Image: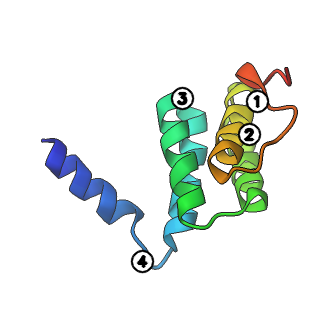
Amino acid sequence: MWAGFGALHEAAVDDGVLPAKIKELMALAISVVKQCDGCIAYHAKAAVARGATAEECAEALGVALLMDGGTASVYGPRAFAAFHEFAGTGQAGTGERGTGT
């Protein structure tokens, strides 16, 4: 079963009409809306690996905030902090639970 999911995952996020980095940013935004910390970490790391920039990440997370409202204001900063962690850029003000601590 996991092999099937792995194949589905690879097919879904590989380059196609949409580049893989855009697909990973989409997955990251969906992870925020679904409130899935493990998904956030996985897709933040994958977005970095696929070449997404911090600016692209911030813009994608802005769409998640627009579409989800309040809960995205908690999970969005978590996702941005995870992105910066995997990018090795560090970012002040994106502490635990998005509180800025």
Q: Mark 3 to mark 2: distance in Å?
A: 16 Å
Q: Mark 4 to mark 1: distance in Å?
A: 31 Å
Please indicate whether residue 6 sits to the left or right of residue 76 in the image: left
Q: Mark 4 to mark 3: distance in Å?
A: 27 Å
- Which of discs 3 and 2 lies nearer the camera? The answer is 3
Residue at figure coordinates x 64%, y 64% from the top left = 52
Q: Is residue 3 visible?
A: yes
Nearer to me, 79 or 90: 90
Residue 65, label in figure:
2
> Residue 60, located in which quarter of the rendered image?
bottom right
* Residue 51 coordinates in the image, percent (x, y): 61, 67
- Which of discs 1 and 3 lies nearer the camera? The answer is 3
Do tag 4 and tag 3 residues touch (Cβ < 8 Å)? no
Quarter of the image with the N terminus in it: top left
Q: Mark 1 to mark 3: distance in Å?
A: 14 Å
> What residue is disc 4 on?
16
Numbered disc 4: secondary structure = loop
